[in-house]
Image: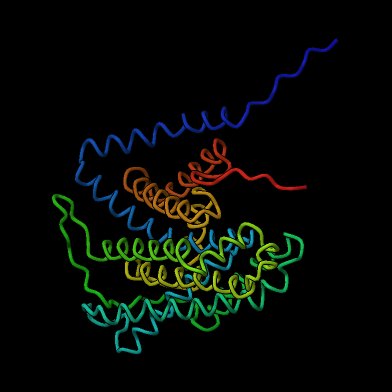
Amino acid sequence: MTAPRAAPPGPKVAAAALGLLALWPLYRVALGAWRDWVGFLRNVLEGVSLGGVYALIALGYTMVYGVLGLINFAHSDVFMVGAYVGIFTAGFFGITASSQAGSSVAVTVACVAAAMVVCALLGMTLERLAYRPVRNAPKLTPLVTAIGVSMLLQNVAMLVFKSTPRGFPPTLRTASVHLGPVATTNIKLLDLGAAVALMVALTLLVQKTRVGRAMRAISTNLEAARLMGVPTDRVIAVTFGLGSALAGAGGILFGLDQPRIDPLTGVQPGLKAFVAAVLGGIGNIPGAMLGGLVIGLVEQLSAAYLSSSFAPAIVFAILVVVLLVRPQGLLGRVTREKV
């Protein structure tokens, strides 16, 4: 008679082991905060500002997934297109990367508006041409289609814009801003403020408007919504458009803060935004916001107190720990699939 085999360690044991490994980074951050609390607060503010941009991109992922159950991997490349639209819009007003930094709020607003419109149209076009024909196909087909669309957009961008990085036009002059003892820049505050305003506007649209109610109905049951008279094709197209518009705005905010744009600009921010969407609870709008802020904060603190090259590893380690303990994400809900 053989002895029973020991049960393998569960997810909580693995999460506890990874949590112990996180003690050293936490110690380094706590030590840095103790030695220079003003610098720590500055890093927190910059991390939240960066997280706001990630949250804008993550919202596009989570909106499309919430309505269709589709991971739109081309979303990060729509973000890249938004940054290029900003470059050409500023150039239309005579501001190029070599121009002297100025303070042109009107041109900045025009860049954001143009990027949101162009990216919304691009997102709706992709939905109509690439995703709608495979909507009822097996789940793997739309996923592979999304990867193919992403590669297509990257290669078209390399063909049209060339692979050489371009500088983002300095439509706004960078100025130091002091919030008490904490010094930051007007660009960081603009990124954070614009991201929060757009996220609030999206939340109100989804919760308080007729289109938002239709989105929530389709998210609950697409076929039932169609039978109740909801124009599902139109609402899904609007969902893609809204998510892509937010990505376009994120591209402008990213360009103002990180003024080097190339056809692969969207890859890393898009990947981190996808992690943020999963961390917060894919398909959950508040979760995408929270996940974006958490990822931005963790990345900034890791780069400041550990190593900039080590920061992505910490981001993904946190995602693994959270998913081991809460597979549905921080604010996600447990759902049961019907068989």
- Residue 215 lies, with reference to residue 105, above or below; the image says above
Question: Residue 12 or 308: which is nearer the viewer?
Answer: 12
Q: Is residue 28 left or right of residue 137?
A: left
Residue 212, how many percent across, how many down?
51, 65
Q: How many marks?
A: 0
Question: Residue 224 or 324: which is nearer the viewer?
Answer: 224
Q: Quadrant of residue 214?
A: bottom right
In the rendered view of the protein, which quadrant contains the N terminus? Answer: top right
- Residue 20 lies, with reference to residue 231, above or below; the image says above
Q: Residue furthest front?
A: 228
**Who's the residue at 69% across and 65% down the image?**
142
**Who's the residue at 57% across and 37% down the image?**
324
**Who's the residue at 75% across and 19% down the image?**
5
Question: Residue 273 or 36: which is nearer the viewer?
Answer: 273
Q: Is residue 281 left or right of residue 105?
A: right
Residue 318, how many percent across, how many down?
48, 42
Residue 151, how many percent across, how many down?
61, 71
Q: Is residue 7 left or right of residue 163?
A: right
Residue 334, how many percent across, how many down?
60, 43
Q: Residue furthest top?
A: 1
- Residue 192 lies, with reference to residue 80, above or below; the image says above
Q: How is the image coloured?
A: rainbow
